[in-house]
Amino acid sequence: MLVSIAILTAGTAVQVHALEKRQSFNQSLPPIITLNGSTIENPTAYSTPFVLNVEDMWDLFIGPVDSPSLTTTVQATPVPSSELIPPPPLYYSPFPSGAQYPTEQKNESWSFPKDFWWGVAGAAWQVEGAVKAEGRGPSVWDVLAHRVTNFAYENGTADISDNHYYMYKQDIARIAALGVKAYSFSISWSRIMPFGRGPVNQLAIDHYNDLINTCLEYGVIPMATLYHWDTPLALQDTYGGWLSENIVNDFVEYARVCYAAFGDRVDHWFTVNEPSVFCNQYPLPAMYFKNFTIPNIQQPFYCGHHVLLAHSQAYHLGTSMMSNSTIGWKSNGGYKVPLTNSSEDAEAVQRAWDFTEGWWSDPIYLTGDYNDNVKAFVSDFLPPFSDQQKTAILGSADLYAHDAYTAQFNYAPDGGIAACVANSSNPLYPACANTTFTYSPQDGGWLIGPASDPLASWLYKATEWVPPFLHYIKDTWAKDLPIAVSEFGFAEPFERQKSYLQDILFDPIRSSYYHDYMRAILIALSEGVNVVGCLAWSFVDNFEWASAYGVRFGMQYVNFSDPELPRYYKASFFEYKSAFDIYQEK
């Protein structure tokens, strides 16, 4: 049964297919075709065409949204020199004098190569705000924040957030004032194509063109991510988003539009950000999105299958359109340390790698196909990759980019790995690897490192594990390819509870995180790991997904009661910059 929904935007009708093709996972209702006025056997199987424009989508599926008071682009103003003074002991005030600080002796055997790019990162839905401005269509995350009660901390929304959509010129000027070399941003798919497919929104093209040109004006390298979790709502409610192979062609067409519009000035591209995270978000909360009958435990792997196909096709398209560009994707996870020296814990570590980084990295860098542990699980419900698909997937990245925040211990589940693998109701199935952030009792039971904010319970300062992590990536996947730390950062504990500005700006644990992390990269470089760049998360406090405004990762403070007020550099930003002042080759 083929039913189409006519969607209007800018006066153009776009045919969006609600049931283009019955998938094997959506056959619980019989395909009934009826004539006008006839009786249908099962009314729940009936669908009908209707017409929506962008405003209708917001009204029907999201509801009212907040708008900023400032709705025109702010022109950049010079950053006052007084704001560029680092905190002590990075800066020694001429008056008052007398303070004594232990100094760090420079290690002359360390250096960042001259062409090492260091920068900061952000993502469209987290920083832009202006969610309905200039024709943007809603995304899945607009539904999650607006309609699913308590999905986001204190029911926060990203309607205004940092208002970066209108303040990007000043934001770029501020990062340039500290000498930042690169700005990694994501493009909002539903700004470019409000329904995920069909007409292209020229106002969005104009906006990102100007953002890119502003970067170049200030000598900042623009780095673009095509997809950072904000699936266009129309695609999710039409065919299930990443659950359907239909998304592959739509994503590749979206990529083509972006490459054509921005590829003459953007040389660094990431196709998708952290697929382990957004695929494991499936199944989405029931009763807020179109329903599909894929078993819950299988949904992340349907998503992952289509991500690999979409990424690989977008990669090859990009290399054909932009021959001088570097194109990759962004992995995530964390270094995995066996809790004990038992063989079972060693196996648990391997399974943890296989079901996180390896889920994507093994196909892209090693074989074109899943590793044995993942394949053993998915072979019962996913179609195998064809030889042509394997060839396209293998080698579809010019570098290995990893969002490498932390490390954790892994150990075998209670009852053993074999028992877990045989029991699909085990909460650790199918990976069957347990995690902890504390050493074993035999090693004292200490934390792996200082804890971040409780709302980021997955994050501990474990910078001493960064060098072995980078070695593992090199030895296992990257081989001779360059490696980039494409995100890393820290949530200062309880920062949201602070009210005194100077207290907020002095962020000692985050500062020590950046200090130690940069030295860890220097160690890896000195040991022969080809790390070519790093991107700190984030250049401002922002909307941190389900943690909303309850957790702060920014190296600049933002007053979310009035995000149009000035931003303020935190001490951690200066600490990050200091590593390059000392160690980058001139």
Image: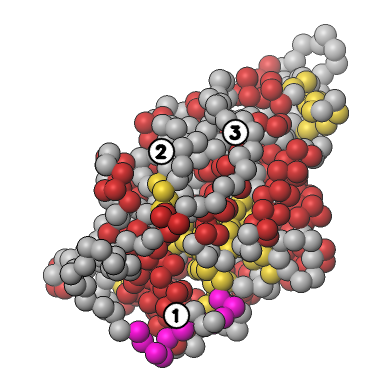
566 vs 263, nearest the viewer: 566
The quarter of the picture where residue 583 lies is bottom left
Q: Is 107 colored magenta in this rendering? A: yes
Residue at 72% x, 20% y is: 46
Q: Are marks 3 and 1 in contact (CB under 8 Å)?
A: no
Residue of label 3: 130
Quadrant of the image containing the N terminus: top right
- The single residue placed furthest to the front in the displayed view is 95
Mark-to-mark CA distance, 2 and 1: 33 Å
Residue at 26% x, 78% y is: 103
The quarter of the picture where residue 390 lies is bottom right
Residue of label 1: 583
Q: Residues within 10 Å of mark 1 (few under 14, many from 20)?
A: many
Q: Amino acid at mark 2?
A: Asn
Mark-to-mark CA distance, 3 and 1: 39 Å
How many numbered callouts? 3
**First along the sequence among labels 2 and 1:** 2
Q: Is residue 57 above or below residue 397?
A: above
Percent position of residue 480, x then y: 60, 84
Residue of label 2: 559
Percent position of residue 236, x then y: 64, 37
